[in-house]
Image (cartoon, rainbow, N blue to C red):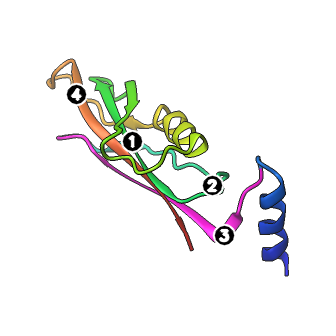
Amino acid sequence: MIENLVKADAETNDDASYGADVKAIASYFLEGRSTRSESVPSYKCRVEGVVVIDVKVNQKGDVIARSINEGKTNTQNDCLRTEALNYSKKWRFTQDFDDSMRKNGWIKFTYVAQ
């Protein structure tokens, strides 16, 4: 079966993907704003977990600062944490020039087996 070959390859290759065996799901909160562009990691880490990224967004909708929320993150896995930080930087939110200069919110990445 091809699915088993993908999983077997992932077990011996740190950069491989589990393919359909694992899914990354993203949710967010940023009061008064919606997303223009979301980026969800392709799954290449070999563990499940939840990583919550606190973000600061400017009036143009760009993520200008981000950090891991240790209290809401349930994993210390470097791969999951790094992927979540990298992908959160790619998110774009709607613009609001009547809003405060910088707005705080969060993005939650949940990695689950199928």
Q: Position of residue 58 (x, y in %)?
A: 30, 22
From the viewer's perspective, is 59 left or right of 3?
left
What separation in Å lies between label 4 and label 1 (alpha carbons)? 16 Å
Q: Is residue 103 above or below residue 12?
A: above
Magenta stretch in the rendered image? 16-32
What separation in Å lies between label 2 and label 4 (alpha carbons)? 29 Å
Question: Dot 3 lies on which element?
Answer: helix
From the viewer's perspective, is 17 left or right of 107?
right
Q: Which numbered dot is residue 95?
A: none
| Residue in view at x 30 percent, y 42 percent | 71
What separation in Å lies between label 3 and label 2 (alpha carbons)? 9 Å
Q: Which numbered dot is residue 103?
A: 4
Q: Earlier in the sequence, mark 3 or mark 4?
A: 3
The residue that label 3 is drawn on is 20
Q: Position of residue 53 (x, y in %)?
A: 38, 38
What separation in Å lies between label 3 and label 4 (alpha carbons)? 35 Å
Question: Dot 2 lies on which element?
Answer: loop
Q: Earlier in the sequence, mark 1 or mark 3?
A: 3
Marks 1 and 3 close (CB-CB < 8 Å): no
Q: Is residue 60 above or below residue 113?
A: above
Question: Dot 4 lies on which element?
Answer: strand
Report the quarter where the C terminus lies. Answer: bottom right
* Residue type beneath disc 2: Tyr
Q: Residues within 10 Å of mark 3 (few under 14, many from 20)?
A: few
Marks 3 and 2 close (CB-CB < 8 Å): no
Of tags 1 and 2, which is closer to the observer?
Answer: 2
The residue that label 2 is drawn on is 43
